[in-house]
Image (tube, grey):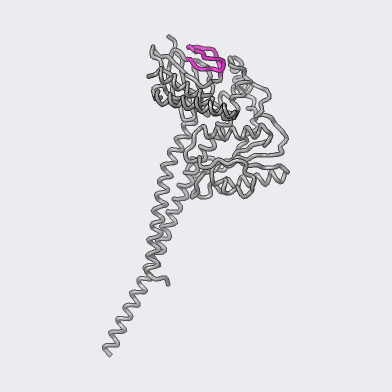
Amino acid sequence: MPSLKDVSDKIVGVKKTSQITKAMNMVSAAKLRGAQQKMEDFHPYAGKFNDTMASLSGASGDYPLMEVRDVKTAEIVVVTSDRGLCGSFNANIVKMAEKKMAEYEAAGVKVSLVCVGKKGNQALKKTGKVRTKHLDIMGNFQMFNAREIAQDIAANFEESGADEVTIMYGHFKSVGVQVPTAIHLLPVKPTEEAGDEVAAASGDYIYEPSQEEIMEVLLPLYMNVMIYNSMLQVGASEQAARMTAMDNATNACSDIVDELTSIFNKARQAAITGDLMDIVGGAEALKG
Amino acid sequence: MAQIELEVVTPAGPVVREQVDIVTAPGFGGVFGVLANHAPFLSTIKIGELAYKQDGSESALMVSGGFCEVSDNKITFIVESCEKGTDIDVDRALKAKERAEKRLAEVKAKGEKINMVRAEAALHRAIARVSVAQKSN
């Protein structure tokens, strides 16, 4: 039987923990709003960008970023958060990357990794395959961060350091659901044949410089857009996952407090009963 | 006068959405102007000054790389960043320009190619910022 003091100390401790988890839950809720806003702000840019990409789908040519080669080395860009305490969010992305790595290796393809975000790097550095890492940027990043990452990946691809690049991140589906997702990044696949209408419309465009040269500018930008988008998604997913995790932790704390309180009461009652017995016993002895 | 709809979007959200008389922008082949009912047009955009006139008043924005599309009497700029001239502090911009010049000279002396491209881009941005700021203030 634990002593009364032990139990009451433990109750105080658990209550303090629950205060912290509750606060973290609220902080994440506030940060989630910011991250969602950032995602919304990016939406028009991405939409317009994709429209233009589609209207250029007629352009054909040899672009280094569209070159399809036999896959000897595959690169996986793993986008995770910098901080933990968000449930299995990062673990799920890492697990997905590990599975893909195993698949590649079974097929005799070498794998290199680019880690964006500390948690992915922590989990994957023991594989010794991490080529580059971009840490401590997930908290407050901007387009130029994505551009640096994109430039590095593109340069590596052009030098045949990798023949295929996949990007993995946690897709923000809703506050409750974040899905680890893999997206093919390089070589850029030509957009599927646009409908006749679009093709006809794009034929009337005046291009400056030529369609092909515009594509050359657009392709690296396309990578920026993809990477920035995945970072935004992870940013929002991380906060949502942390909110859920902290909510669960707070609930677990109150369950433990209930349990401990009932143990405490039992111990208290046992102590009182014991004391009473002593008093009654003592009184009886005096009477005797 | 017939007007054209101007829209500027950046990754951080839309910046401008207005009906304007004329837009001049730093295109791939030099500065170009677009009036209402322009033919469909697609061009890359360099770092520089995007100016537009609206009922006689002129506004200037500093834009960095991206591209622009004209169709259906609407001109859309899809750029990586954009600053309003009135938001730029001239003194700070001038100092940034000096710094960029110094850095470019240093890098040139060392002969680092990648850093040189970066330093040049920084200087271009600084110059564009100064000219936009001086016009707007």
Q: Determine the image quadrant of residue A12.
A: bottom left
Name the residue nearer the viewer: B96 or A46: B96
Relative to A25, is A164 above or below?
above
Residue found at the very far bottom of the displayed protein: A288
State whether residue B58 appears in this view: yes
Relative to B5, is A6 above or below?
below
Residue found at the very far top of the displayed protein: B1
Magenta span covers which residues?
B24-43
A249 left or right, relative to A221: left
State whether residue A221 appears in this view: no
Q: Determine the image quadrant of residue B118.
A: top right
Residue for point 57% across, 30% down: B115
Quadrant showing the N terminus of chain A: bottom left
Name the residue nearer the viewer: A284 or A136: A136
Residue for point 47% across, 15% down: B23
Q: Give the x, y percent position of residue B112.
A: 59, 30
Residue found at the very far left of the displayed protein: A287
Residue A75 is covered by the magenta coloring: no
Name the residue nearer the viewer: B26 or A178: B26
Q: Give the x, y percent position of residue A242.
A: 47, 47
